[in-house]
């Protein structure tokens, strides 16, 4: 399991307006490109340094490639990161707060305790 | 020595800026009451006539990330740029630039380390809405120098609730030992019950009104004993998955002092989460 890497994907896509649009329009292509080119970048470090060992599990890759925020919640992705990015991608297609409420409703089957988000 | 002229604890609601500045059809029905409440709350800071603001908040995965996550961090810089692209995008928050008070930052870092808090520091910190929301509500002129203090309420493993209280108590003593004639207000923001990205988010009220009622009572009466007896890292999951932000309120109860009743208490039951506003005057209520 690479919960940290799923969070890193959500975090780095969310902070880049072009990547937000790219992920909205071409999710699987964006996930595969990101895993190949960006997953191992050490963020708080000068450019050029990289890790060598980070990759998604199949389940994680599919959850991201399918925009499946319910699966991401089940995997323990940080819900603040998921929510923020998904609002950026999909709120525009809905009325005020409609998307946020539907997002919550799709998670209604989860009981306490929620999946662990510790990385 | 410096004087702590006000201790203020508040929720930080990123929707306030947009709600309060919207007009016509865009203005939500609750905006007028919210602005009225905030205007009264703002007056509690204004009458304390502060020169410097110590601002306690929590980065929401903006500058602080999982590859290098401090538990408690003090900014020490001459300036702080503020608000991030995704806060502009989602909440309409403006970009801001705040001045820093580096002498007080250095004093808090040195004294904090000497008292057993292994504080991280940052000389280039872009702050987010946990600090700018209270600037917008309490000091919209954004004209006073600040010392930002960030806590980790967001990325487990988190420090224990009692550690937040202890840090608050230490911050109060440290500020009062700062060799300066300046008047300092200590302001911190957190959450009552809150759910983000989970099934209970964006309901008609906060996810746990009973927790909110108890929490407001603990804060208003300074009841740290009961608060610490009931609140644990585990227990905070049940009022809502983002409720660990309540530990910033506990830190502020530590700043205000155990058993110290707040001089000003107000709240507003909004959709999604309850707003709550508290002010203590350590040296008595200032005359207008």
Image (tube, coloured by chain):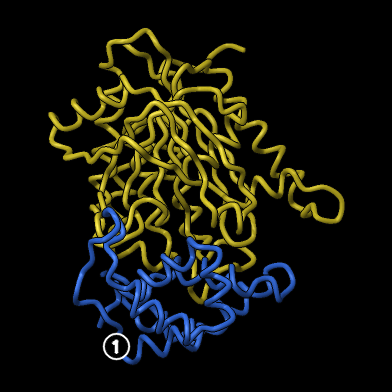
Shade representing chain B? yellow
Nearest the eye: B156 or B282:
B156
Nearest the eye: B90 or A97:
B90
Chain label for disc 1: A
Which chain is depicted blue?
Answer: A
**Which quadrant holds residue B173?**
top left
Q: Residue at x 72, y 44 (%)?
A: B20
Picture coordinates of residue B10, whole percent (x, y) = 50, 41
- Residue sitting farthest toward the right: B24
In the shown orientation, is residue B232 left or right of residue B19? Answer: left
Picture coordinates of residue B133, whole percent (x, y) = 55, 42
Query: Residue at label 1?
Result: A57
Nearest the eye: A38 or B62:
A38
Picture coordinates of residue B87, whole percent (x, y) = 55, 53
Alpha-carbon neighbours of circle 1 within 10 Å: few (<14), some, or many (≥20)?
Answer: some
In the shown orientation, is residue B260 left or right of residue B108? Answer: right
Q: Residue at x 46, y 27 (%)?
A: B280
In the shown orientation, is residue B199 left or right of residue B56? Answer: right
């Amino acid at each position: 399991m690479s919960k940290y890497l799923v969070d890193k994907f959500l975090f780095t896509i969310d902070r880049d307006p072009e990547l937000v649009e790219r992920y909205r329009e071409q999710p699987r292509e964006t996930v595969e490109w990101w895993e190949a080119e960006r997953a191992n970048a050490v963020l708080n470090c000068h450019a050029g340094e990289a890790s060598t060992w980070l990759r998604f599990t199949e389940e994680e890759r599919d959850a991201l490639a399918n925009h499946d925020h319910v699966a991401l919640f089940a995997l323990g992705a940080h819900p603040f990161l998921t929510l923020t990015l998904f609002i950026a991608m999909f709120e525009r297609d809905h009325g005020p707060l409609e998307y946020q409420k539907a997002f919550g409703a799709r998670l209604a089957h989860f009981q306490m305790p929620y999946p662990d988000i510790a990385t | 020595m410096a004087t702590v002229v006000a201790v203020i604890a508040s929720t930080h609601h990123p929707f306030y800026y947009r709600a309060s500045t919207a007009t016509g059809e865009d203005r939500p029905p609750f905006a007028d009451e919210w602005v009225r409440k905030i205007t009264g709350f703002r007056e509690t800071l204004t009458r304390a006539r502060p020169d410097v603001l110590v601002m306690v908040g929590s980065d929401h995965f903006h500058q602080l990330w999982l590859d290098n996550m401090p538990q408690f961090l003090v900014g020490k810089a001459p300036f702080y740029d503020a608000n991030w692209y995704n806060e502009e995008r989602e909440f309409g928050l403006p970009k801001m630039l705040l001045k820093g008070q580096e002498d007080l930052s250095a004093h808090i870092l040195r004294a904090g380390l000497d008292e057993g808090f292994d504080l991280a520091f940052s000389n280039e910190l872009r702050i987010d809405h946990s600090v700018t929301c209270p600037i917008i509500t309490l000091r919209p002129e954004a004209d006073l120098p600040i010392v930002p203090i960030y806590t980790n309420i967001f990325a487990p493993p988190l420090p224990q609730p009692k550690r937040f209280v202890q840090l608050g108590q230490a911050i109060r003593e440290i500020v009062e030992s700062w060799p300066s004639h300046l008047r300092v207000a200590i302001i911190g923001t957190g959450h009552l019950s809150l759910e983000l990205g989970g099934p209970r988010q964006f309901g008609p009220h906060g996810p746990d009104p009973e927790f909110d009622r108890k929490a407001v009572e603990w804060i208003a009466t300074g009841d740290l004993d009961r608060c610490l007896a009931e609140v644990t890292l585990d227990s905070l999951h049940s009022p809502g998955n983002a409720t660990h932000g309540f530990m910033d309120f506990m830190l502020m109860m530590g700043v205000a002092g155990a058993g110290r009743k707040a001089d000003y208490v107000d709240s507003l039951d909004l959709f999604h989460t309850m707003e709550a506003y508290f002010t203590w005057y350590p040296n008595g209520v200032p005359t207008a």
